[in-house]
């Protein structure tokens, strides 16, 4: 239990550090590299990159805060207590409805109250990582004069960079970008997997052992999605919104 509690405190710190490093690289390395050295004007590609990055940053941070803000309240019970038709988080000792799991990166449980914000957080986190990955690949291609047309280039990049770094021909900032490429790729895949997994769970509805319904009365997958994301689901994707009380 102590290790779980420690992980529950370190995982949010890890996420915030990853976000801070990504923000620093985008602002102080990638964006200046897109600017024309002969003028102070920012090209159209740089403006589009800045707008898309700002959009993903606002949605990632906004939904991250909403996941914590709308976390299920404490039940005031012991983690060892068994309650009928209730699920108790063994880490938080909270009584939950429709619990998905305990998310260590937010330090709270995912339940009906914050499920929408969590799915959107995973979606925008995945998009942010892949956006940073594509931008970082462009930066590396320019500075390393490498072509990523060959898929094996991505696999050879790390040992090549380590060799150059210890030989003194690669600066620390470029080495950091190379390491972050692999981290963005891994985190982006993990967030995309979580997002798809929860969308599948939402669309199929609650488990059959909790609610026995006939096939003709069972809601469709669109109705199940609408229960979580609401009718204005597109607005929720574009801008973080508080889940309405039901």
Image (spheres, helix red, strand yellow):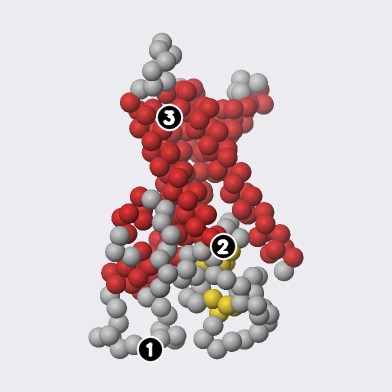
Q: Are marks 1 and 2 in contact (CB under 8 Å)?
A: no
**Which residue is at a point 71% across and 59% down the rendered structure image?**
6
Which disc, if any, is residue 138? 3
Q: Residue 140, how many percent across, how many down? A: 48, 28
Q: Quadrant of residue 21?
A: top right
Q: CA distance from mark 1 to mark 2?
A: 28 Å
Q: Residue 59, how many percent across, how many down? A: 44, 48
Q: Residue 240, how many percent across, how many down? A: 42, 53
Q: Residues within 10 Å of mark 3 (few under 14, many from 20)?
A: some
Q: Earlier in the sequence, mark 2 or mark 3?
A: 2
Q: CA distance from mark 3 to mark 1?
A: 53 Å
Eyeballing the image, is 8 above or below 46?
A: below
Q: Which residue is mark 1?
A: 212
Q: Which residue is mark 2?
A: 103
Q: CA distance from mark 2 to mark 3?
A: 33 Å
The extreme front residue here reads 245
- Identify the secondary structure beneath mark 3: helix
Q: Residues within 10 Å of mark 2 (few under 14, many from 20)?
A: some
Please give left or right for residue 116 compared with residue 88 in the image.
left
Please give left or right for residue 156 compared with residue 169 in the image.
left
Between disc 3 and disc 1, the foreground one is 1
Which disc, if any, is residue 233? none
Please give left or right for residue 96 compared with residue 214 in the image.
right
In this rendered view, identify the residue nearer to me: 155 or 229. 229
**Which residue is at a point 36% across and 64% down the rendered structure image?**
229
Q: Quadrant of residue 68?
A: bottom right
């Amino acid at each position: 239990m102590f290790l779980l509690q420690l992980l529950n405190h370190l995982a949010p710190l890890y996420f915030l550090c990853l976000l801070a490093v990504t923000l620093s690289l985008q602002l102080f390395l990638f964006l200046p590299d897109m600017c024309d050295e002969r003028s102070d004007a920012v090209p159209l590609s740089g403006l589009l990159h800045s707008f898309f990055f700002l959009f993903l940053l606002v949605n990632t941070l906004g939904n991250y805060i909403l996941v914590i803000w709308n976390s299920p309240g404490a039940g005031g019970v012991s983690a060892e207590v068994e309650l009928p038709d209730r699920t108790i988080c063994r880490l938080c000792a909270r009584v939950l409805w429709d619990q998905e799991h305990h998310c260590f990166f937010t330090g709270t449980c995912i339940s009906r109250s914050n499920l929408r914000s969590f799915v959107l957080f995973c979606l925008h986190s995945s998009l942010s990582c892949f956006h940073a990955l594509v931008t970082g690949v462009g930066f590396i291609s320019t500075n390393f004069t490498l072509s990523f047309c060959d898929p094996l280039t991505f696999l050879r990049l790390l040992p090549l960079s380590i060799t150059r770094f210890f030989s003194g021909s690669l600066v620390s900032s470029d080495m950091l970008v190379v390491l972050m490429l692999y981290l963005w790729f891994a985190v982006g895949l993990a967030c995309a997997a979580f997002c798809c997994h929860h969308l599948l769970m939402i669309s199929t509805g609650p488990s059959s052992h909790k609610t026995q319904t006939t096939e003709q009365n069972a809601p469709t997958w669109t109705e199940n999605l609408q229960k979580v994301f609401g009718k204005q689901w597109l607005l929720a994707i574009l801008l973080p919104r508080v889940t309405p009380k039901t």
